[in-house]
Amino acid sequence: MSGATAVWFDAPRSVALRTEPLPPIGPDELRVRALASAISHGTEMLVYRGQVSEGARLDLPSLAGDFGFPIKYGYASVGRVIDTGSEVHGVERGDLVFALHPHQTEYVLSANLVWRLPDGVPPERGLFAANLETALNALLDEPVRLGERVVVFGQGVVGLLVGMLARRSGAGRVLVVDGYERRRALALELGADAALAPGPELTGQLVEATEGRGADLVFEASGNPDALQATIDVVAQHGTVVVCSWYGAKPVTLELGSHFHRGRVRLRSSQVGQVDPALLPRWDRARRSAEVLTLLRELPLERLVSHRIPFGDAADAYRLVDERPEQTVQVVLTYRTG
């Protein structure tokens, strides 16, 4: 067996680089040499901080350890295929692929966890495949109708992508909410009609910006449980709040009084693991993946990258996201290719 180096969390907020052996590839597997990987500022940072219940199940075979630590976690890597098993079809040596794999210099994984990137899509664009799939799934769960007023809470990567897709889907107005000035400015550059900061005046500002009606559709992508109440407060009667965030072990307290109850507000979860059964058989995971690959070509994804940090300095990268989130949008780890 040859070796590779991987990022592990040994304890909350403790990052280690471990050398581990690589197994020989099986008939349905690939060996990939990483070029870049993206830190998830939502779910992955919950894991880094120890804010996931220890008994939670790992949902990808490429992950290792458990949420009680140590754990190897991550799901956005782009690399070059350097070897393939005898039963692998559609991917060849030399191909550029997106892989649902943690941060690691080389790895062996099932071909089912890999997407071949379209020709001409550079590695950095490919890193957004997983978050794009999450954002697209949110709009499949709750489509935007032509002319509707959409509010997106949270302008991390998923929130920014949801806003861009809402605009492409025909939203009349796209309003966004985020606590960080850098992200609000970026949202405006990418097409949002207004970008507001949280605060006591927010509900009134959003109601005014929607001509007194409230939002037809609100997406909660901030990862902040306290934001969920604000989404309910600003949605219109018979409107819908879609929760894209995973709060981990953080509790959520809501006031579900007059507006929620009498306004018949709908609160629903969107999770990328499944396509809405109501869309089957027209939409399945294969069609969703194909649409993501198209979007990788078309959206200005490079503008979401705020930092590029060498893989060997991964501990610094996580510390940056954790302690100075106001400076970050998407932090990317880069790998030596020699």
Image (cartoon, helix red, strand yellow):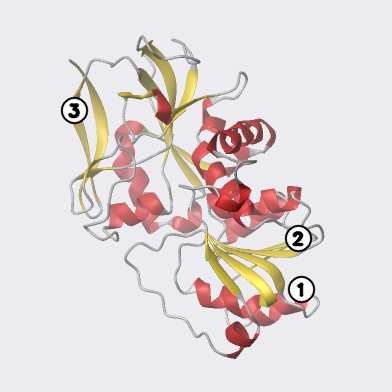
Tell me where residue 239 sits by quadrant. Answer: bottom right
Per the model, the C-alpha gap separating discs 1 and 2 is 10 Å
Task: Say few, some or many: other residues with alpha carbon within 10 Å of mark 3 (under 14 / 14 to 19 / 20 or more).
Answer: few
Of residue 4 and residue 82, the one placed in the foreground of this image is 82
Q: Identity of the amino acid at label 1?
A: Ala
1 and 2 marks in contact (CB < 8 Å): yes
Q: Secondary structure at mark 1?
A: helix
Residue 193's tag is: 2
Relative vertical location of residue 117 with respect to residue 176 in this rendering, above or below: above
Tell me the quarter of the image containing the C terminus. Answer: top left
Q: Is residue 276 visible?
A: no
Tell me where residue 290 sits by quadrant. Answer: top right
Residue 77's tag is: none
Q: Which residue is mark 1?
A: 209
Q: Identity of the amino acid at label 2?
A: Asp
Locate residue 166, reporting x and y percent. Answer: 70, 53
Q: Identity of the amino acid at label 3?
A: Thr
Tell me the quarter of the image containing the N terminus. Answer: top left
Does residue 185 appear left or right of residue 220 in this picture?
Answer: right
Locate residue 302, reporting x and y percent. Answer: 60, 36
Identify the residue shown where x is 39% and y is 39%: 75
Q: Which residue is mark 3?
A: 19
Tell me where residue 246 sits by quadrant. Answer: bottom left
Q: Earlier in the sequence, mark 1 or mark 2?
A: 2
Relative vertical location of residue 21 with respect to residue 259 in this rendering, above or below: above
Task: Say few, some or many: other residues with alpha carbon within 10 Å of mark 1 (under 14 / 14 to 19 / 20 or more).
Answer: some
